Image (cartoon, rainbow, N blue to C red):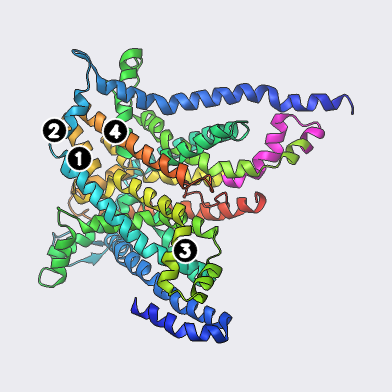
């Protein structure tokens, strides 16, 4: 703080003589100082745990705690075998399914809102989407349990249990995930739909195109980067979700997040103490791929839809 | 040509209008039914008929108030730290060069690459160093203090990291609508100090964006379960899950319904008050923005 007042004190007289250079100098001096607290906090609270996870994934103390640590790729190998591999694939399958359905449903809902004449509807859906996409987790899982669980209101009144329905299954989880994924897709795709120019549609119609042809050859290609980016974002979101699954299904659906939690609680085979960290590293790799695809796509969609 | 013109409007307007209604109806049902059914579940007792005992039983349920208080304290601390470190950085980015901007954006995007459960895994590893390696050093006391069950600072650190991507986008979207260099220069030329220029000129213009960042952080902390449960603390969400395991049935659902409704109400107030200028207000994950 004292350093920043110093900067002001020296900058003030100079500003009278040469305002532009003084301003630039003052800003340049203040920049790193203002950013420093952020960098320090992130280095401590994020950097150290991330490095600890990375290091732990490649080391083992398999002769018991306190013995010498040595390097190994055994944790990573173990994390890609047996029940752990099943869980990883289960997470990927669940996330792909939920993201695909949400992308289609989100696009339909967003298009219905964008083409509506009622500004109120648009405002309401945008606000609701912002809220629903950001807050769910445990309370949401329990709301679904009360609705469609074994003793749930709809299950009882409609006799769904006799029809073979179970919320604590793959499709049950997909249904719950849609509750926060569809709003996220609506938020992602509405700016792009707004960017579709009316002239493009008119041009297509003047050339005799049907609605289907317009979507197939004009709208969807223009929207493709934004849709794909949204899909990838939803995938990442579903892949990282833990609370919903933990509160709802316990362990009846194999998911990597549930396996990591299990391993961290000490439920592992002897000598695989760090397999939870190796699975975490697997997740980081997947999430890193997601971001590596998402960010360029987001830039690309910005090029067409200004 | 003349015959073509009347037929043009009829192509898009007929089928989609029916489709639009159907899409909206199905969506409304999907999003409303679980909440309504959960409310019915809590008030409908098979023996006594309609009763509010699930809601009146909340306060009496063991551990409810301490858990809620812990969540609120964690939220307040997280919000304070996030604003303290992020506001100066976000303003400096607007004043400074592109290298500074790139650095801050990378730092605020990195947490998205590490899912909460992976962060929790890393944190448990670090906390285990305490007894294993650091027992005779001053660091040991620090590690113990971080995990004080009354107020686990380690959770605040984790939540700060997890809020950064959301909060930074919210602040940056607000700052983008201001001409920060000109405002700062005007304040400095009028004799204000640097701190006063920020608090007196920039921050009042940022009220919407600040509110946005605060509410997103609040929602994140109140709803967070993963890190808290892995590290073994018991804020609100963890209490709900543990409560359902110990068969508090309708009370658990009642608490869930209340917390959903309250948080949604908070967030709606936010998007109604602060978000008017940028319609995608709480949608801070959407990097494109509409402004």
Q: Nearer the viewer, residue A252 or A202?
A: A202
Badge 2 element = helix
How far apart are the alpha carbons under marks 4 and 3? 37 Å
Q: Are marks 4 and 1 in contact (CB under 8 Å)?
A: no
Packing grade of label 4 (10 A; few <14, some 14-19, many >=20) is some
Q: Is residue A199 visible?
A: yes
Q: Specify whether A260 is left or right of B191.
A: left
Q: Dot 1 falls on which chain?
A: B
Q: Is residue B249 visible?
A: no
Q: Magenta stretch: residue A88 in it? A: no
Viewer-side label of 3, 1: 3
Q: Nearer the viewer, residue B257 or A40?
A: B257
Q: Nearer the viewer, residue B116 or A253?
A: B116
Label number found at residue B239: 1
How far apart are the alpha carbons under marks 4 and 1? 14 Å
Viewer-side label of 4, 1: 4
Q: Are marks 4 and 3 in contact (CB under 8 Å)?
A: no
Label number found at residue B60: 2
How far apart are the alpha carbons under marks 4 and 2? 16 Å
Query: In which quarter of the view is residue A206 placed?
Result: top right
How far apart are the alpha carbons under marks 3 and 1? 40 Å
Q: Can you identify the residue that label 4 sits on?
A: B258
How far apart are the alpha carbons under marks 2 and 1? 14 Å
């Amino acid at each position: 703080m004292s350093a920043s007042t110093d900067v002001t004190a020296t900058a003030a007289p100079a500003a009278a003589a040469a305002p532009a250079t003084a301003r630039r100098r003052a800003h340049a001096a203040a920049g790193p100082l203002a950013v420093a607290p952020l960098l320090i906090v992130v280095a401590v609270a994020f950097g150290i745990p991330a490095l600890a996870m990375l290091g732990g994934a490649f080391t083992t103390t398999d002769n018991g705690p306190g013995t010498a640590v040595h390097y190994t790729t055994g944790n990573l190998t173990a994390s890609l075998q047996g029940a752990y591999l099943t869980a990883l694939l289960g997470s990927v399958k669940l996330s792909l399914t939920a993201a695909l359905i949400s992308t289609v449903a989100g696009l339909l809902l967003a298009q219905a809102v964008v083409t509506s004449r009622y500004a109120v509807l648009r405002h309401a859906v945008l606000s609701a989407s912002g809220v629903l996409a950001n807050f769910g987790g445990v309370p949401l899982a329990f709301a679904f349990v009360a609705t469609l669980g074994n003793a749930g209101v709809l299950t009882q009144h409609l006799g769904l249990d006799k029809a073979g329905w179970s919320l604590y299954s793959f499709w049950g989880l997909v249904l719950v995930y849609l509750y926060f994924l569809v709003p996220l897709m609506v938020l992602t795709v509405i700016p792009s739909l707004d960017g579709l120019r009316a002239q493009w549609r008119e041009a297509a119609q003047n050339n005799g195109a049907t609605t289907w042809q317009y979507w197939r050859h004009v709208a969807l290609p223009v929207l493709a980067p934004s849709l794909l980016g949204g899909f990838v974002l939803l995938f990442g979101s579903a892949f990282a979700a833990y609370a919903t699954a933990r509160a709802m299904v316990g362990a009846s659906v194999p998911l990597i997040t549930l396996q990591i939690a299990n391993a961290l609680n000490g439920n592992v085979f002897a000598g695989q103490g760090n397999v939870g960290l190796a699975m975490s590293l697997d997740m980081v790799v997947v999430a890193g791929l997601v971001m590596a695809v998402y960010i360029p796509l987001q830039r690309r969609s910005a090029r067409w839809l200004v | 040509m003349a015959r073509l013109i009347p037929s043009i409007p009829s192509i898009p307007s007929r089928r989609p209008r029916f489709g639009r209604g159907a899409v909206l109806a199905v969506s409304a049902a999907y999003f409303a039914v679980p909440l309504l059914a959960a409310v019915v579940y809590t008030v409908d007792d098979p023996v006594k008929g309609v009763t509010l005992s699930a809601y009146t039983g909340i306060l009496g349920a063991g551990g409810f108030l301490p858990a809620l208080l812990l969540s609120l304290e964690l939220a307040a601390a997280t919000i304070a730290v996030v604003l303290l470190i992020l506001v100066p950085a976000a303003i400096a980015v607007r004043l400074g060069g592109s290298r500074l901007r790139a650095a801050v954006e990378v730092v605020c995007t990195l947490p998205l690459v590490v899912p909460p459960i992976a962060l929790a895994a890393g944190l448990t590893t670090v906390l285990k160093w305490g007894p294993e390696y650091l027992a005779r050093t001053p660091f040991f006391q620090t590690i113990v203090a971080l995990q004080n069950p009354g107020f686990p600072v380690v959770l605040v650190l984790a939540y700060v990291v997890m809020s950064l991507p959301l909060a930074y986008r919210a602040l940056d979207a607000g700052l983008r609508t201001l001409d920060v260099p000109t405002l700062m220069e005007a304040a400095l030329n009028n004799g204000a100090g640097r701190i006063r220029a920020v608090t007196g000129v920039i921050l009042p213009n940022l009220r919407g964006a600040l509110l946005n960042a605060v509410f997103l952080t609040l929602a994140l902390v109140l709803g967070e379960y993963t890190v808290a449960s892995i590290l073994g603390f018991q804020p609100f969400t963890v209490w709900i899950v543990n409560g359902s395991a110990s068969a508090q049935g309708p009370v658990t659902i009642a608490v869930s319904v209340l917390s959903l409704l309250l948080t949604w109400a908070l967030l709606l107030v936010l998007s109604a008050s602060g978000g008017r200028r940028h319609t995608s207000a709480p949608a801070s994950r959407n990097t494109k923005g509409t402004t």
